[in-house]
Image (tube, rainbow, N blue to C red):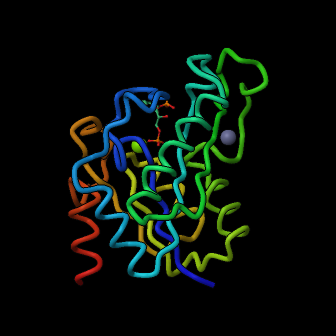
Amino acid sequence: MRPAAFLDRDGVINLDHGYLYRWEDFEFVPGSVDALRRLQAAGYALVIVTNQSGIARGYYDEAALQALHDALRHHLASQGITLAAIEYCPHLPDGTVARYAIDCDCRKPAPGMILRSAQALGIDLAASLMFGDKTSDIEAAERAGVGRAVLLATDANPAAAKGRNPEFTSLADAVDALLHA
Ligand SMILES: O=P(O)(O)OC[C@@H](O)[C@H]1O[C@@H](OP(=O)(O)O)[C@@H](O)[C@@H](O)[C@@H]1O
Ligand SMILES: [Mg+2]
Ligand SMILES: [Zn+2]
């Protein structure tokens, strides 16, 4: 069993422009690539877990999302960084695309994406980390039994804290603190 760093995508790895689905619009949060590299070097499997309700809302389809994630994998691989998995939830209970308009077990704060990737990859959840910019990210991690969940207060989501105290303003700062603790 190995530990994972579970990573929310929008607002943590890339700037959250709102239902982003095109690689040309993808902007890394400053310092996020190096933070991924440091997590990998510390022995964490890198697992992205991302809500993608834009699919249930009809803004883009799964093929477009897969293409974006292929480009992301390729870019990170060129930097020596391997993503162990990218899990996404396309669902939204009141979505307009019928086959995705369901109450699923994977839309954060549900823990489904974390649990299924942990099962597939043999992850030690108690030794794992989660980094998210919304309280729903943190709740999903807690419900899955992730050992340490870190809320980031990003410019895009200052309200995301919603009663929780964000600990850091970026993945880079959080990784600095956790890996050097
Ligand atoms: O942060 P992750 O989970 O990687 O992805 C979030 C995105 O899917 C979108 O999630 C939406 O929330 P709703 O899904 O509409 O509640 C909004 O917050 C958008 O701004 C955001 O781009
Ligand atoms: Mg997010
Ligand atoms: Zn889902």
Tag count in the figure?
Answer: 0
Where residue 87 appears, as percent x and y from the top left, is 61, 50
State the residue at coordinates (59%, 21%): 60
Where residue 140 appears, as percent x and y from the top left, is 54, 55
Q: Looking at this view, name the residue that lies furthest to the front.
A: 78
The quadrant of the image that shows the N terminus is bottom right
State the residue at coordinates (38%, 72%): 39
Where residue 81 appears, as percent x and y from the top left, is 44, 64
State the residue at coordinates (21%, 38%): 155
Reply above or below: 120 against 22.
below
Left or right relative to 102: residue 73: left
Q: Nearer the viewer, residue 129 or 17?
A: 17
Reply above or below: 99 against 47.
above
Q: Nearer the viewer, residue 130 or 21?
A: 21
Residue 40, by quadrant, is bottom left
Where residue 106 appears, as percent x and y from the top left, is 66, 47
State the residue at coordinates (35%, 43%): 14
Left or right relative to 109: residue 99: right
The quadrant of the image that shows the C terminus is bottom left
Q: Looking at this view, name the residue that lies furthest to the right.
A: 99
Reply above or below: 100 against 116.
above
